[in-house]
């Protein structure tokens, strides 16, 4: 069945991998948590409407102005009114900010992954397929980008760029330094695939270059692409949060998890929930993505071995 | 060998020049005018022009770029007449904020970054490799599952979250450690150790998790090799097969990755140093970025790139020493 739908599908069919993942408790839990986060991100306006607190609404009644703005009540002001508590000082609702922050984090990570994959696949296949000087140039660029202290450089670029659309800039910068890691693998696999019999056969029977690339080579890269991109997403979520934490990422008042943790640094001694909540969400999201990518790789590897 | 080294050295220089050029272009074209920032609120156009002149910012791009490069190797002069300041080689310019020589700032802070990096490296190598080895030998047991589950979880904790959590538990709640202070080893070794302990743990945690997983995978692969079966078949004890035959091929790839990771850290552990307020190169980078202090950002970027690129060469040389199958031939 699967073969009939995807003419070039490799031996490891999607259905077999899905079956393996469904039987893995870690993978199912991770997927469930990620689905929850995605739902929360999509339903952020709904959450705000129900609780009656927007992500940037100040609620001075929820904080104790006499004590420098520490939230009223235990655990960072957790109450029926504010299920995850409020920010110290201005009393913004943490649940609303987490939900809106999830939008920013996931959107940036997804866009960065898409752009990285596009760049990595196009340039990697170009290098492996055309070879010659094109390959040389692309390889040099990759060496150059990978020799960079990427984090410091990303920060240097982001800090010197004008305050424009931070989200777009973040995606561009993260992908600009991320694509070589994918392209290197794509190039290597393309190099070996180009010389395989089935590609030569297709070429001999008069297939166009486009057909060779899209019908013969690309389908064979599918499993490693799925695994590599899944394993890259948690890295991008972490990078976005890290850059926002350092103050060069998403600009306030737009909420982002990294930025929330950064603003909690001065409060960790009196209001530990302020960093614990966004920290936990960030940790669990990265962990779920990592576990999912790890299990996906194991499932694909097992398919190749059999 | 000499030809190989010369080729690699040339490659290092080319990459560093490109890093320089790239950073320079970005600052030259995109950054807000540093003269306006230095001048402050009570500012006149003449004063701005004066400052731009003193900093050499009125020169064309290429002239500025080449004076920067010449400054690194031969030193350079800033301003003219009575305001002339000579900056001796290696000259990386003066901070826009404090007017300190950037080179002096780097030299002053490098030992802190090195202390953070070396301590963390020792910790993560010991813990990571030991945990990975035990897991590989006991593959499939509860220890293996627990250790690898922990490693997977540990590598997902962002280090600033770990830093805040540790500080909250150890410093605020249990009060077993003082808040990290800038103390020299000679002044008070105990406080020095206590101050660096949390940064080491925070920085090492992520790497230790990664290295444990890598070591485990490599050792399991090596144990399945034919030469291991031969070693066992000729009656070598498990400990000896491990020590004499398995460790070297299994750990050589780890040495390569370690070289790269460590080199990258010498250029400053940005987040760890910032969170713990350690005055190293990384914190200097973060501070200068916040204040748009371009000469300092430029210097830190170059320094970090230098360590990474040179580290790359060292790793390749060490690799040939560790793995006799790889031999250097001049291309």
Image (cartoon, rainbow, N blue to C red):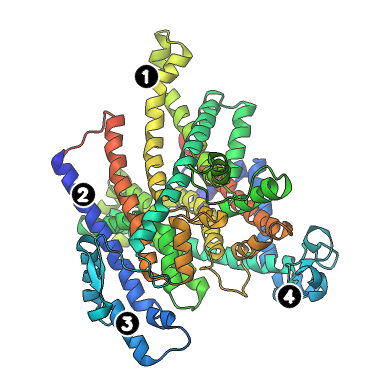
Could you tell me which quadrant the N terminus of chain B lies in? top left
Assess whether mark 4 and mark 2 are in contact (beta carbons under 8 angstroms). no
Image point 50% across, 38% down: which residue?
A: B124
Q: Which residue is mark 3?
A: B52
Question: How far apart are the two marked residues, 4 and 1, measured between alpha carbons?
Answer: 65 Å
Q: Chain of mark 3?
A: B
- Residue B227, numbered circle: 1
Location of residue B316 by image quarter: top left
Q: Nearer the viewer, mark 4 or mark 1?
A: 4
Looking at this view, is B298 or A229 the one in front?
A: B298
What kind of element bears circle 4?
Answer: loop
Image point 50% across, 43% down: which residue?
A: B207
What kind of element bears circle 3?
Answer: helix
Could you tell me which quadrant the C terminus of chain B lies in? top left
Q: Residue furthest bottom?
A: B45
Question: How far apart are the two marked residues, 3 and 1, measured between alpha carbons?
Answer: 68 Å
- Residue B9, numbered circle: 2
């Amino acid at each position: 069945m699967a073969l009939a739908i995807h003419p070039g599908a490799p031996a490891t069919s999607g259905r077999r991998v899905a079956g393996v993942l469904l039987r893995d408790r870690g993978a199912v839990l991770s997927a469930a948590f990620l689905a929850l986060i995605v739902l929360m991100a999509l339903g952020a306006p709904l959450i705000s409407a129900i609780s009656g607190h927007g992500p940037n609404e100040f609620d001075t009644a929820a904080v104790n102005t006499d004590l420098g703005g520490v939230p009223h009540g235990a655990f960072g002001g957790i109450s029926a009114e504010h299920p995850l508590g409020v920010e110290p000082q201005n009393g913004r609702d943490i649940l609303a900010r987490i939900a809106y922050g999830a939008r920013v984090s996931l959107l940036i990570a997804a866009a960065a992954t898409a752009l990285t994959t596009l760049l990595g696949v196009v340039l990697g296949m170009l290098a492996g397929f055309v070879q010659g000087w094109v390959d040389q140039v692309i390889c040099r660029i990759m060496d150059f980008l990978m020799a960079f202290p990427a984090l410091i450089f990303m920060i240097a670029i982001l800090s010197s760029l004008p305050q424009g659309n931070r989200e777009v800039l973040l995606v561009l910068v993260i992908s600009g330094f991320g694509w070589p890691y994918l392209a290197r693998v794509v190039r290597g696999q393309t190099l070996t695939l180009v010389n395989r019999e089935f590609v030569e056969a297709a070429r001999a029977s008069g297939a166009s270059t486009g057909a060779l690339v899209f019908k013969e080579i690309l389908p064979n890269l599918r499993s490693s692409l799925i695994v590599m991109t899944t394993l890259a997403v948690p890295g991008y979520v972490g990078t976005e949060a890290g850059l926002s934490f350092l103050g060069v990422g998403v600009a306030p008042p737009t909420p982002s998890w990294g930025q929330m943790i950064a603003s909690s640094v001065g409060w960790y001694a009196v209001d530990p929930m302020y960093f614990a909540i966004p920290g936990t969400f960030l940790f669990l999201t990265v962990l779920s993505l990592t576990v999912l990518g790890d299990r996906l790789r194991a499932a694909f590897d097992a398919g190749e071995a059999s | 060998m000499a030809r190989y080294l010369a080729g690699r050295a040339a490659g290092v220089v080319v990459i560093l020049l490109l890093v320089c050029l790239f950073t320079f272009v970005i600052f030259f074209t995109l950054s807000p005018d540093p003269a306006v920032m230095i001048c402050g609120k009570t500012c006149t156009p003449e004063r701005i022009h004066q400052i731009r002149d003193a900093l050499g910012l009125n020169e064309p791009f290429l002239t500025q770029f080449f004076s920067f490069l010449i400054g690194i190797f031969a030193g350079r002069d800033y301003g003219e007449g009575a305001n002339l300041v000579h900056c001796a080689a290696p000259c990386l310019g003066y901070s826009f904020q404090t007017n300190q020589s950037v080179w002096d700032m780097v030299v002053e802070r490098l030992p802190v970054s090195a202390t953070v990096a070396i301590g963390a490296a020792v910790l993560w190598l010991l813990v990571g490799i030991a945990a990975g080895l035990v897991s590989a030998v006991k593959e499939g047991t509860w220890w293996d599952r627990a250790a690898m589950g922990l490693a997977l979880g540990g590598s997902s904790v962002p280090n600033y979250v770990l830093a805040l959590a540790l500080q909250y538990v150890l410093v605020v709640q249990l009060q077993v450690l003082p808040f990290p202070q800038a103390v020299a080893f000679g002044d008070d070794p105990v406080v020095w150790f206590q101050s660096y302990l949390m940064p080491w743990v925070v920085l090492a945690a992520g790497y230790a998790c990664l290295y444990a997983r890598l070591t485990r995978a490599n050792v399991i692969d090596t144990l399945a090799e034919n030469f291991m079966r031969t070693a066992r078949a000729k009656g070598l004890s498990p400990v000896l097969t491990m020590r004499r035959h398995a460790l070297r091929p299994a750990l050589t790839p780890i040495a390569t990755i370690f070289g790269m990771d460590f080199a990258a850290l010498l250029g400053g552990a940005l987040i760890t140093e910032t969170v713990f307020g350690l005055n190293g190169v990384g914190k200097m980078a973060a501070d200068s970025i916040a204040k748009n202090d371009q000469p300092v950002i430029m210097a830190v970027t170059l320094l970090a790139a230098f360590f990474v690129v040179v580290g790359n060469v060292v790793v390749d040389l060490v690799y040939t020493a560790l793995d006799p199958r790889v031999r250097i031939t001049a291309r």
